[in-house]
Amino acid sequence: MMDQGKVTEVLKTVQDPFLHKNLMETHALRDLKIQGDFVSLKLALSRQDSVKQMQIQVEISSKLKEKGAESVGMRFTLLSADEIKALGGFPEEETSLLSPKSGTVFIAVASGKGGVGKSTVSVNLALAMARLGKKVGLLDADIYGFSVPDMMGIGNRPTLKNDRIIPVERFGVKVISMGFFVENNSPVIWRGPMLGKMLNNFFSDVDWGNLDCLILDLPPGTGDIAMDVHGKIPHSKEIIVTTPHPTAAFVAARAGEMAVKTEHEILGVIENMAYYQSPKTGEIEYVFGQGGGEKLSGLLKTDLLGQLPLRQPVEQEGEFAPGVYFEGDPVAAIYDSIAEKVINKLQK
């Protein structure tokens, strides 16, 4: 049998979506009629929003039916300005990274195709910029090929605080990846609209805090997902990653052209796997050829920011992070040099 106590119990578990207080705290209940197992309510919300009203109606109805209601009717009205003021007013809205008020610079790391080390560059550029004192976030936006958590040795997941996702922090960098939301490395089989919603969540529902820059590890190529990401981050800066082979540079040029068409500023080119240096003899071999980075930077009329060797990172005792070049590693020094060039470009 339904009674008023059961109704008020439910209303204590449902929040006004704009005041972030439960409906009993906001004195939202304006009328209540209970006839047997039929419940009729009139609720006052702080703002007119048909979508939020529908969500609240579904939530309250389902909870009341769990407590025994057979049927639930609901009407809505608005709290007065004086009532809202008495409740402390509307809380300050969190500033989204995409908001014009955000001072965060987006640096997208792109490539013409997979397998050129784009994620390795994204991770180690983020770490290098953090070493240079910048507040850095890293968004693994390669939805189908997420690899950042594994490369950085991240075993924990993001947490929730005040309905906001708190990124995982590792080596001074705040990280969000699709890999955090997939169980047991399962393949992602979502289609475009669902992926677009997830990307929006990464920008708007994550509490990134005060960042100087957010580095985005983009999907390779110029497909729909890559285009979607480009469209969501207007006026981003961009770095193109290639290997030395001239054909790889030709393919990477397409990613550069997409950056130009979406009004992204190209900061420069990074040539990965540029050479192999024997640890025994010091002899250098150009395993994948030469000139790809210079050719690409020439095509895109930009700078060659650096050339990275083909070499595994040196493990650091007590830290599992197979894709990280730690400070003291010669390759980390190259990344530091690249990061300095990037920062100088951003300051101009």
Image (spheres, rainbow, N blue to C red):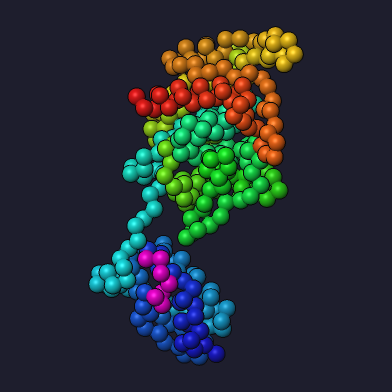
- Viewer-side residue, 12 vs 199: 12
First to last magenta residue range: 19-25
* Looking at the image, residue 218 lies above or below residue 38: above
Q: Is residue 348 visible?
A: yes
Residue 195 screen position, x and y as percent: 54, 45
Is residue 301 inside the magenta stretch? no
* Image point (59%, 25%), residue name: 332
* Position of the N terminus by quadrant: bottom right
Q: Position of residue 347 (x, y in %)?
A: 36, 27
Left or right: residue 224 versus residue 31 is: right
Residue occupying the far left of the picture:
82
Residue 237 quadrant: top left
Whether residue 22 is in magenta: the answer is yes
The correct choice, above or below, for 271 with respect to 289 in the image is: below
Residue ID at (31%, 68%): 88
Q: Quadrant of residue 281?
A: top right
Residue 47's x, y, as percent? Answer: 33, 65
Count of numbered marks: 0
Q: Main secondary structure of the magenta part?
A: loop
Residue in the picture at 53% in, 83% down = 69
Q: Where is the C terminus found, in terms of image quarters?
A: top left
x and y percentages locating residue 212 in the rendered image = 42, 37
Residue at coordinates 66% horizontally, 47% vertically from top-left?
155
Observer-nearest residue: 28 or 93? 93
Say which of 31 and 218 sits in front.
218
Q: Quadrant of residue 223?
A: top right
Residue 228 in sight from this viewpoint: no
